[in-house]
Amino acid sequence: MDSEESRVVVPRNFRLLEELERGEKGIGDGTVSYGMDDADDIYMCSWTGTIIGPQNTVHEGRIYQLKLFCDKDYPDKPPAVRFQTRINMTCVNQETGMVEPGLFPMLTNWQREYTMEDILLTLKKEMSAPQNRKLHQPPEGSDDQRMEQKDLAQRCAIL
């Protein structure tokens, strides 16, 4: 028998259905959540995430909304991640709200086993990192609406 481990590759839609089910059940202590933007999105491209800022940081008690876009290559390639709520973090583009893959190691070193939950939890952990925990933040309630849900749906339809 071959000594290499045979690996089953779960198809994209099955993987996303698993993530949806897990997201709907709730995660850990409730400070991170995620789900689909539109239940009618049969391609399961557009997702919304929420992170409640970690204690003992400038983010404490703040609620951050994010958009995650899983194109046809997910989970082989990471989703695009964008903060809708304005935030000052070293890995986030201040003009667009996009999490910059080159500045966020999880996206740079993406592995198929990673999930949207992992991304949200790692971003929350990054909020507590020394370089981010005390950064001045935009006023609360300064949500950014540059990328509307319809824009994400259009991107998904192109796939």
Image: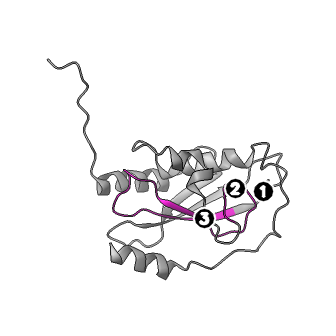
Considering the numbered disc 2 on the image, is that residue within a helix, a strand or a loop?
Answer: strand
Majority secondary structure of magenta residues: loop
* Dot placed on the residue nearer the N-terminal end, 1 or 2: 2
Q: Which residues are magenta?
A: 64-93
Q: Is residue 18 magenta?
A: no
Q: Which residue is mark 2?
A: 52
Using the rendered view, name the quadrant where residue 155 is placed. bottom left
Work out whether residue 40 can be spotted: no
Callout 2 amino acid? Ile
35 relative to 62 in the view: left or right: left
Residue 35: horizontal and vertical position, in percent?
49, 62
* Dot placed on the residue nearer the N-terminal end, 3 or 2: 2
The residue lying toward the viewer, choosing from 12 and 104, is 104
49 relative to 153 in the view: left or right: right
Q: Which mark is residue 98?
A: 3
Give the CA distance from mark 1 to mark 3.
22 Å
Nearer the camera: disc 1 or disc 3: 3
- In percent of the image, x 42 and y 56: which residue is there? 20
Q: Which residue is mark 1?
A: 61
Work out whether residue 6 can be spotted: yes
Residue 140: horizontal and vertical position, in percent?
80, 69
